[in-house]
Amino acid sequence: MSLNATRKLFAPGSFPTLLLILGLSLIMQACASKQVQVERERFFFPPAPETPRIEYIKPYFSDMDLHGKQDGFMSQYVLGEKPPANLFAGPTDVVSDGKGRVFVTDTTRRQVVILDLNRLESRLLNQARETGTGQEALLSVPYSVDIDDQGRLYVVDPFLKKIVIFGPDEVYQRTIELPEIGRPTSIALDSAHGRIMVADTSLHQLVVVTTEGIVIGTIGERGNGPSQFNYPTDVDVDEQGNVYVLDTLNARVQMFNPELEFVREFGERGTAAGSFRVPKMLAVDPFGHIYVTEALDHKIVIFNREGDFLLRVGGKSMVTNGVSPGGFYLPRGIDVDQNGTIWVVDSLNRMIHRFQFLTPEYLAEHPVE
């Protein structure tokens, strides 16, 4: 058979090619009908023989990670399906509502990406509202996010100096303007006291704002003593109303009681266990643990409320070499929801990671041998 004849035989749309694709399709369907569920390998921290406290679940890098398709090359190219789309370009912060929705700010795309684990889909938050003359953009650069106990989403824009609030239905509700604040980088909602804690990075202070947007107090000035800050970048509130501020360039966490009185500080600059070089963000879980992402050492550092170092998770890992459970490439935002699920932004790998704190409820359903 001549080369030209061979080319015609296997050209797109030729009968043999159609038969080949049909055959491959039938083979794939037959394999799918006989799929055997394979138990995934499990990864725990700390590793054996120590008692595990945290389990690595999975990464979310593309839309394929949401709907779990595993057909790979065959379905994408032979059968003409589209390759998976990346979920993020520059993920920064993350918050989970604990009910199947995860909100991630993407400062490169200037959007908030919603991962809907119930519907197995992703979508973008509508960041505009209708006016009499058209649509008005509500946000310039969504940077930090938080959720209150009513399911309302609060998005911080440090450049426009405002907080934009969306309802549980993801529809815009109202805006809190913060003109007196230098650079509102992060917020924490204190629903029990009806207030919002704002980390003002450029003015080195913690600002207390009512839910109506009225500034009722400030803490701090530039320095390295108690209640002083050097570029604070994040804040969170625990279930008792204690406030934790990530004092970034002082490489420490400062803790305040509900009356906003200084209690203690923990962490220090360095590379040893319980220390930081460039801490980025923090989160407090419902069980009394404080998690801090450390950028240059690509890790999470975990403490208890007393400031005792408990555990370190992570190490440098670039996605070009594959996803390493517990590996990061400049982690940033972190959140722990009421289920003990830990969400971590892996910024330079353009993904988020899902971990699980081993609660009694989780262990009852997923026992560890």
Image (cartoon, helix red, strand yellow):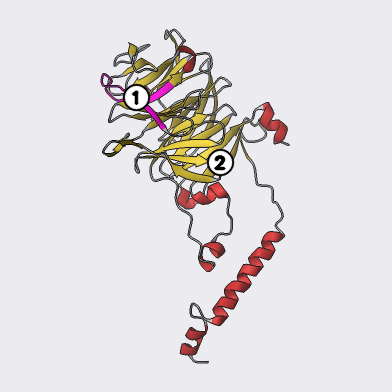
Give amino acid for label 2.
Leu
Q: Is residue 192 left or right of residue 204?
A: right
Query: Which residue sits furthest front?
Result: 132
Q: Position of residue 189 (x, y in %)?
A: 44, 20
Give amino acid for label 1.
Leu
Local secondary structure at mark 1 = helix
Q: Position of residue 31 (x, y in %)?
A: 68, 63
What are the residue bounds of the magenta stretch?
172-188
Q: Is residue 30 left or right of residue 233?
A: right
Residue carrying label 2: 117
Q: Is residue 179 magenta?
A: yes
The main secondary structure of the magenta stretch is strand
Q: Is residue 258 visible?
A: yes
Residue 231, picture quadrant: top left
Q: Residue at x 50, y 78 (%)?
A: 13
Question: Mark 1, residues whose alpha carbon is within 10 Å: few (<14), some, or many (≥20)?
Answer: some
The vertical placement of 41 against 248, above or below, is below
The vertical placement of 80 against 115, above or below, is below
Tag on residue 249? 1
- In whole angstroms, how far apart are the C-alphas of marks 1 and 2? 36 Å
Q: Residue at x 28, y 23 (%)?
A: 202
The vertical placement of 242 against 108, above or below, is above
